[in-house]
Image (cartoon, grey):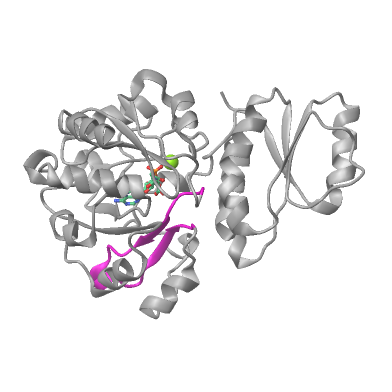
Amino acid sequence: MTQDYSRAVQLLQAGELVAFPTETVYGLGADAANPEAVAKIFAAKGRPADHPLIVHLPGAAHLDRWARDIPAVAWELAEAFWPGPLTLILKRAPEVPYAVTGGQETVGVRVPAHPIALDLLRAYAQAGGGQNGLCGIAAPSANRFGRISPTDAAHVHEELGDAVALVLDGGPCTVGIESTIIDLSRDDGFPPGLLRPGHITPEQIEDVIGVLPELPEERQDSNTPRVSGSLDAHYAPLTPMRVVATAQLPDVLRSLKENGKCLGLLAHTRQPGLVPLHALRQLPDEPEGYARGLYAALRELDQAGNDLIVVEDISREPGWAAIADRLRRAACGSGVS
Ligand code: TXA
Ligand code: MG
């Protein structure tokens, strides 16, 4: 693996792409200070160039090079949750290229908790980092635009093939869904906004800074940063997908089957007595285990030749909020090739 780190660092410094595991999902990385390298990310993903990317840092000590007017609450959150699955949106420092911020005056930053991501970032910093000596790796999820995020190295190969020079393999991701994004780019960081729900909950944020972040619907004004994960259609299988309440599953599945549909089911409670299904994936009936397995299960059901993926609806409890968000967007973007 040591060998891989030095090769990965060389590739990044040469402006090439390197995919790597984080605790959330695999990222498709490039030197965040090099606009030409960043352009390769957009090309490989088929992603519109005005979508901003998250910059991954080796530690909070690097924050000053990437952001300016950093509010006290940002340092408090960094101290509490980094390394970890929390992205902070801050005012952009002058050196940060617009290529990485999608042309905006804000930048998204996080310190990932995965040992391979951290070792890579530290090796990169030790080798002098990228352009202008800046040590940030820009990395969106390593999937084609709008599709299911990769939580295993094999998924990255499936998504991007030869478009990526090197994939560091860290096995399956432990969190399984993307980081929580908090907008602190207003003056003094207040009021903070939740741009994308994730493993770290609004209540955990409140415990640290004393304020519950505003939800996206409370925050619609022209200053709100754009978040591609907030597009209605995202994280989506090519196969049409529909969320069905647990109580309705037997009837809905029977009538779909009678109509000749080849069905895949993603369930989290035991479902005795259902019609025979073409494919069944069972996830744990608690949010952490469910999130960890969600994208791999959707990917498998998507590849199993189903006409429709039926997803058993989940709890409305706050602990399931980030999963509810991903399922809604996946259903919305599904079935479009
Ligand atoms: O867990 C994660 O965050 C993963 C891993 C690889 O770190 N990354 C990830 O990246 O999910 P991506 O590009 O798929 O999603 C990044 C999100 C997008 O919704 C993007 O719009 C938002 O972060 N974002 C990045 N910079 C931003 C900015 N300056 N303002 C608003 N949103 C920003
Ligand atoms: Mg993504």
The percent position of residue 267, horizontal first and vertical second, equals: 74, 46
Q: In screen coordinates, is 303 left or right of 102?
A: right
Specify the segment rendered in magenta.
176-198
Q: Residue furthest bottom?
A: 210
In this rendering, is residue 284 above or below 274?
below
Query: Count of labels shown?
Result: 0
The percent position of residue 335, horizontal first and vertical second, equals: 63, 29
Q: In screen coordinates, is 139 left or right of 326?
A: left
The percent position of residue 13, horizontal first and vertical second, equals: 15, 33
Q: Quadrant of residue 106?
A: bottom left
- Would residue 332 be seen by someone viewing this image from the given angle? no
Q: In screen coordinates, is 113 left or right of 289?
A: left
- Would residue 57 be seen by someone viewing this image from the given angle? yes
Q: Residue furthest left?
A: 132
Q: Residue at x 84, y 47 (%)?
A: 271
The percent position of residue 31, horizontal first and vertical second, equals: 20, 38
332 or 20, which lies in front?
20
Q: Residue at x 47, y 65 (%)?
A: 218
Q: Quadrant of residue 32?
A: top left
193 or 154, which lies in front?
154
Q: Residue at x 31, y 36 (%)?
A: 1
192 or 312, which lies in front?
312
Q: Residue furthest top?
A: 162
Residue 190 shown in magenta: yes
Residue 22 shown in magenta: no
Ligand 2 found in image quarter:
top left
In this rendering, is residue 290 above or below 205?
above
Q: Residue at x 89, y 46 (%)?
A: 272
Q: Quadrant of the C terminus?
A: top right
